[in-house]
Image (tube, coloured by chain):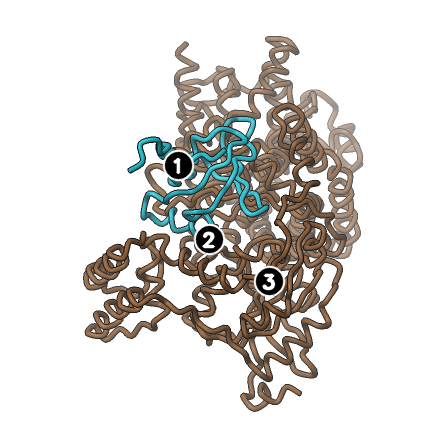
């Protein structure tokens, strides 16, 4: 293991405007399968494009599309921040 | 031309399959025109439209499947899709699947296609919104895609009818020469996992197909597995199948999409050119519409317009319908003068009932006009994004806002508007919450009681505040109930709240009018008949048994009472003139006597003890009971009961002063006023919480089921009663 590897965060905890690479979908519940079906897959790069005025849900840009998720669901997705 | 269909001697069936927001329904409308009908899928509230189109001279049945992202049957919508394609719905599988794709988002849209290819049904691919491809800086090689997929690919701009002729030709061609998309080549361990389940189930004599076995393995909450039964046998089989996948380093929950997407990326290699940049206009408009300050401001402005249209703008049209109803009554009534029963049935039962159905149409049409525009422009998704946090905690979601807001004008369009919610659990909860919102029909009783009892004692300021606060009683009770229901009662699995932010689009008049027509028609046919029946039943309960001696006895008593005050011949002369003041008073008194002896009146007297703990006398009880079909009739009923005639309104000084003076005639409270403050508040809260609206019950029954309609009616009645009793019991001890 590389020492300077960034620790894995979850997508729900990422700041507005930040781009991330999806590393894993942590759970194997049905919701995880659903997120995968929408294209939230390891290796994809996404960006937090917007946060609702009340703090939740968040809007995620992926492949030129925008999909909004509640933070609780976004937290099923493990990500690594990229510059 | 359609020889392949002819020989089978049955109409061919095609199914439209696609993600939400692909314009699938627009294509359906274009293909079938208005030759369509909507059916609710049995058991769940997913609606499926079927229609007919002509291919050559052949009638072809077209099925518009609910929009779905995946065949993993996580939601009822998707379950319907899988059932329909699988032929397990009591019908054979379709002869052709027309896959409608959003051309600007091919990768994700192809997942469903790739999954459906497993079923080996002939397919045709439509790339819709073709005009947006160029706008978004993309170039798509449709011919290359057709080559790779092995089926015809048609490009359309369905909104404007572009490419529709080509699509019809392609459908006809595909029915003659069916082409299939080759199935994805699964890695060996997936085949092994599939065989574990299939072979294991073979012993039970339950024959599942390969694709069905795969669905059960991939879908953790597979509805399909529930249907197969043999749970105890199936569970270990699925576990070992999933372990096989896990042993190859894949998460079984995401293995299927991962493998499909790998396949799709290979298919799309070289098909799409361009960087897939975000549509710039969408980004800048979103920056405004989702802005913390401006976005919220615009949201409230938009919602204000929607609400105002239902609350105020629909008013004149509704008045017109009511006036029209009265006009028809006046026209028809004299024709039946000879037979009072028939006259009353036709006039007060049937004509009033039909008028009572049509009167809801303006609000329904207006609301669906706005909903069609909000959905088609893409704003509804943004509104849901802004509001979701407010509703999420109690099991609703951002899309509940419009139905609940509409409920403040009228629960009927509100309940119908809950169709915009895809998540069945949130849709159910929203429908059940909507009747708690303080609709405009509750206003008259608030105005009457506040005007009679609060304003004279506490002044206009307190009266105003009371009226304002009464509008929140329902919501304040309903929201925690929704939370409780979601936590403890509803067994439906919660769906993740996934909201796609579509590109902004200009709505078309055609789509908007079709939506309005669809909903208006469904209401008239489905709910209208029930509402009319209720209206006739209630008429009968208020009319019969109507013994003749009631009128005579009331007249005698009236004359005896008045003769002490005026000479007998003057009295007789007054009563001989039907337009005189005394004649009217007598008529009103007879009307009151009839309602007292009607079945409903007798019932009201009989059940008065039930309402006694809330301090209601038999008159209030009859008023409350007769308001169950439609709460706004309380004022007219009170007018009749208090011998003022049915023409009183909530501002009537006569009615206000008469109820203010009303005293108990018997029982332990004899001589005390009936309407004390706790009774008045209790009565208003009862009206706030009770579902006194037959039309709402009928609409809930049509949108959900009779079971839910009856359950919510019973629950609201009990809650209303408990609240009124608590207020009276606590209030009169203070």
Q: Disc 3 on helix, strand or loop?
A: loop
Residue B596: image x %, image y %? 54, 37
Q: Please name whichever residue, B357 or B638, is drawn nearer the observer in this view of the structure.
A: B357
Q: Circle 3 sits on which residue?
A: B271
Q: Please name whichever residue, B451 or A31, is drawn nearer the observer in this view of the structure.
A: A31
Camera-nearest label, 2 or 1: 1
Camera-nearest label, 1 or 3: 3
Pointer 3 or 2: first along the chain: 3
Which residue is at a point 41% across and 38% down the rendered structure image? A79
Supply the letter of whichever chain is brown.
B
> On the same chain: label 3 and label 2?
yes
Q: Do callouts 3 and 2 mark residues in contact (Cβ within 8 Å)?
A: no
Number of residues whose C-alpha sits closer than 10 Å to that of mark 1, classed few (under 14), some (14–19) or many (20 or more): some
Number of residues whose C-alpha sits closer than 10 Å to that of mark 3, classed few (under 14), some (14–19) or many (20 or more): some
Which residue is at a point 71% across and 68% down the rendered structure image? B164
Taking the image as shown, residue B663 lies to the left or right of residue B376, namely left
């Amino acid at each position: 293991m590389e020492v300077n590897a960034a620790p894995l965060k979850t997508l729900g905890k990422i700041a507005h405007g930040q781009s991330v690479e999806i590393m894993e979908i942590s759970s194997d519940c049905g919701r995880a399968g659903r997120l995968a079906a929408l294209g939230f897959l390891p290796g994809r790069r996404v960006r937090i494009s917007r946060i609702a005025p009340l703090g939740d849900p968040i809007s995620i840009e992926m492949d030129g599309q925008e999909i909004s998720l509640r933070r609780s669901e976004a937290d099923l997705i493990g990500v690594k921040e990229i510059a | 031309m359609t020889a392949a269909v002819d020989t089978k001697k049955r109409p061919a069936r095609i199914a439209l399959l696609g993600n939400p927001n692909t314009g699938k329904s627009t294509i359906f409308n274009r293909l079938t025109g208005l030759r369509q009908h909507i059916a609710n899928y049995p058991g769940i509230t997913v609606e499926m439209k079927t229609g007919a189109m002509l291919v050559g001279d052949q009638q072809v049945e077209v099925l518009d499947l609910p929009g779905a992202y995946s065949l993993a049957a996580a939601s009822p919508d998707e379950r319907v899709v899988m059932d329909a394609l699988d032929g397990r719905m009591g019908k054979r599988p379709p002869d052709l699947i027309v896959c409608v794709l959003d051309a600007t988002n091919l990768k994700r849209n192809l997942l469903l296609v790739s999954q459906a290819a497993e079923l080996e049904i002939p397919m045709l691919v439509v790339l819709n919104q073709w005009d947006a491809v160029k706008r978004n800086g993309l170039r798509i090689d449709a011919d290359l895609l057709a080559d790779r997929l092995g089926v015809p690919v048609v490009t359309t701009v369905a909104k404007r009818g572009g490419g529709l002729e080509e699509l019809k030709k392609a459908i006809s061609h595909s029915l003659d020469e069916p082409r299939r998309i080759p199935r994805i080549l699964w890695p060996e361990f997936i085949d092994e996992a599939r065989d574990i389940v299939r072979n294991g189930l073979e012993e039970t004599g339950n024959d599942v197909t390969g694709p069905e076995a795969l669905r059960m393995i991939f879908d953790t909450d597979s509805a399909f597995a529930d249907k197969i039964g043999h749970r105890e046998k199936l569970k270990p089989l699925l576990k070992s199948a999933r372990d096989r996948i896990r042993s190859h380093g894949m998460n079984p929950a995401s293995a299927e999409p991962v493998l499909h997407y790998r396949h799709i990326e290979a298919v799309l290699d070289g098909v799409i050119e361009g960087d897939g940049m975000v549509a710039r206009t969408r980004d800048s408009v979103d920056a405004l519409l989702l802005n913390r300050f401006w976005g919220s401001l615009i949201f409230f402005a938009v919602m204000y317009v929607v609400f105002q249209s239902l609350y105020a703008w629909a008013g004149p049209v509704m008045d017109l319908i009511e006036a029209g109803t009265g006009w028809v009554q006046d026209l028809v009534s004299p024709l039946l003068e000879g037979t009072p029963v028939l006259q009353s049935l036709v006039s007060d039962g049937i004509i009033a009932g039909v008028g009572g159905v049509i009167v809801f149409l303006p609000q329904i049409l207006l609301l669906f006009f706005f909903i069609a525009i909000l959905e088609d422009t893409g704003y509804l998704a943004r509104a849901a994004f802004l509001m979701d946090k407010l509703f999420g905690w109690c099991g609703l979601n951002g899309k509940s806002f419009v139905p609940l807001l509409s409920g403040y004008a009228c629960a009927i369009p509100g309940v119908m508007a809950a169709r915009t919610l895809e998540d069945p659990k949130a849709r159910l909860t929203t429908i059940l919450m909507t009747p708690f919102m303080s609709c405009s029909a509750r206003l008259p009783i608030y105005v009457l009681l506040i005007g009679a009892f609060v304003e004279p004692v506490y002044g206009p300021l307190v009266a105003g505040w009371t009226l304002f606060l009464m509008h929140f009683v329902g919501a304040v009770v309903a929201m925690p109930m929704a939370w409780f229901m979601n936590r403890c009662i509803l067994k439906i699995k919660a769906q993740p709240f996934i909201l796609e932010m579509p590109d902004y689009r200009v709505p078309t008049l055609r789509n908007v009018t079709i939506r309005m027509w669809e909903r208006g028609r469904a209401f008239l046919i489905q709910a209208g008949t029930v509402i009319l029946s209720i209206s006739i039943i209630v008429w009968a309960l208020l009319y019969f048994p109507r013994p003749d001696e009631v009128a005579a006895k009331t007249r005698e008593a009236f004359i005896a009472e008045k003769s002490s005050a005026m000479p007998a011949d003057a009295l007789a002369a007054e009563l001989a003139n039907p337009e005189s003041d005394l004649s009217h008073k007598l008529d009103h008194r007879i009307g009151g006597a009839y309602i007292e002896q009607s079945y409903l009146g007798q019932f009201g007297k009989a059940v008065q003890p039930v309402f006694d703990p809330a301090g209601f006398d038999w008159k209030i009880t009859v008023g409350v009971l007769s308001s169950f079909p439609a709460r706004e009739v309380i004022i007219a009923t009170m007018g009749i009961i208090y011998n003022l005639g049915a023409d009183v309104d909530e501002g009537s000084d006569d009615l206000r002063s008469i109820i203010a003076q009303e005293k108990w005639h018997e029982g332990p409270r004899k001589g005390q006023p009936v309407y004390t403050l706790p009774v008045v508040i209790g009565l208003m809260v009862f009206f706030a919480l009770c579902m006194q609206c037959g039309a709402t019950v009928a609409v809930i029954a049509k949108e959900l089921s009779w079971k839910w309609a009856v359950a919510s009616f019973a629950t609201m009645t009990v809650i209303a009663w408990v609240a009124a009793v608590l207020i009276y019991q606590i209030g009169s001890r203070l």
